[in-house]
């Protein structure tokens, strides 16, 4: 294991009515964490405390966050693995040993190796999605790329001009390090704001099976006090979350935002 990773708690990603407290309540918890965090480290500790993210080994500070998602029960199973090699990245495999950055590990001659060394998302510079007769598909909302692709397709058909299309489909940087996450969430929340101001687009998102959360929130019974309280908490912390994320990301975030205008 060359790097430990923070992992998204799968229970917070289930857009079904029976998971309302975990999904929408989890979003409210995360907004509060974004609003109150004093640093990136403090942010992840707050996200862990509210159950939004998990780590396999509690005595290790993860340095990676690729939005991988896992259930708490799966984490408990992984914690039963005690022979964890922490000698950096694998360089090569020999018949009787592994060669890593910081040493060698002997292995049995009949050992089976499963190659998990490739990255699922290659880091690339951000650029506008709509560029004349060319589309460069990128993420518009974390963490689900299928929704971003569907959104870009809808916007391409229903809106005129690259400027308006790119305003609605602002590119969200995919996080690789922990410091990348506040910047990604800032871009994510900015897009959500623009979508909320557009009635037709808002209705399309609500009806999309790739969204789920909008429909879940819009279907709340006005008399359901506990769920209405969760929604109130979500709305209360969202503006403060954006303001604090701007503070956490500093000048680099301001630079990213200015390039999107």
Image (cartoon, grey):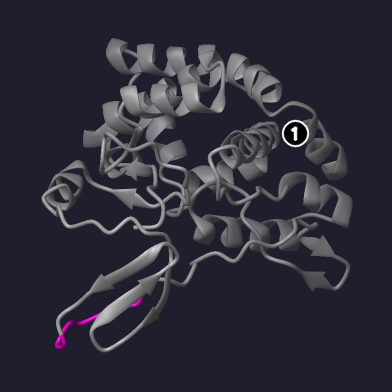
Q: Position of residue 171 (x, y in %)?
A: 70, 50
Does 140 appear in magenta? Answer: no
Name the side, left or right, on which 161 lies relative to 200. right
Q: Is residue 243 above or below residue 15?
A: above
Element type where label 1 sits in the image: helix
Nearer-the-camera pick, 35 or 63 = 63
Q: Position of residue 97 (x, y in %)?
A: 27, 79
Q: Is residue 134 above or below residue 29?
A: below
For the C terminus, which image quadrant? top right
- The residue under label 1 is 253
Q: Position of residue 235 (x, y in %)?
A: 52, 17
The residue stretch that appears in magenta: 109-116
Instruction: Kindly identify the residue that appears in the image at 47 percent across and 46 percent down.
Output: 65
Instruction: Kindly identify the residue that appears in the image at 64 percent across and 61 percent down.
Output: 123
Name the side, left or right, on which 13 lies relative to 80. right
Instruction: Kindly identify the residue that appears in the image at 58 percent across and 20 percent down.
Output: 241
Nearer-the-camera pick, 101 or 125 = 101
- Residue 219 seen in this snapshot: no
Instruction: Kindly identify the residue that appears in the image at 79 percent across and 45 percent down.
Output: 167
Q: How many marks?
A: 1
Quarter where residue 103 is shown: bottom left
Q: Residue furthest front?
A: 103
Q: Position of residue 218 (x, y in %)?
A: 44, 30
Name the side, left or right, on which 258 lies relative to 137. right
- The majority secondary structure of the magenta stretch comes to loop
Nearer-the-camera pick, 250 or 231 = 250
Q: Is residue 222 above or below residue 44?
A: above
- Residue 69 seen in this snapshot: yes
For the N terminus, which image quadrant? bottom left
């Amino acid at each position: 294991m060359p790097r430990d990773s923070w992992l998204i708690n799968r229970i917070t990603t289930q857009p079904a009515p029976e998971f309302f407290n975990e999904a929408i309540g989890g979003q409210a918890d995360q907004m509060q964490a974004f609003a109150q965090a004093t640093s990136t480290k403090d942010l992840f500790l707050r996200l862990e405390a509210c159950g939004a993210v998990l780590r396999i080994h509690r005595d290790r500070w993860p340095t990676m966050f690729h939005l991988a998602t896992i259930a708490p029960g799966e984490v408990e199973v992984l914690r039963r693995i005690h022979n964890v090699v922490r000698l950096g990245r694998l360089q090569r495999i020999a018949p009787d040993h592994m060669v890593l950055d910081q040493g060698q590990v002997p292995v049995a001659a009949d050992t089976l190796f499963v190659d998990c060394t490739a990255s699922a998302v290659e880091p690339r510079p951000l650029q506008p999605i709509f560029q004349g007769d060319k589309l460069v598909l990128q993420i518009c909302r974390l963490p689900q790329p299928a929704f971003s692709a569907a959104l870009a397709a809808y916007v391409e058909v229903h809106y005129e001009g690259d400027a308006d299309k790119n305003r609605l489909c602002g590119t969200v940087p995919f996080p690789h390090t922990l410091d990348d996450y506040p910047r990604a969430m800032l871009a994510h929340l900015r897009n959500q704001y623009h979508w909320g101001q557009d009635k037709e687009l808002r209705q399309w998102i609500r009806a999309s099976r790739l969204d789920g959360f909008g429909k879940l929130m819009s279907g709340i019974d006005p008399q359901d006090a506990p769920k209405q309280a969760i929604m109130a908490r979500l709305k209360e912390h969202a503006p403060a979350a954006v303001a604090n994320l701007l503070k956490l990301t500093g000048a680099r975030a301001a630079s990213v935002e200015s390039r999107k205008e």
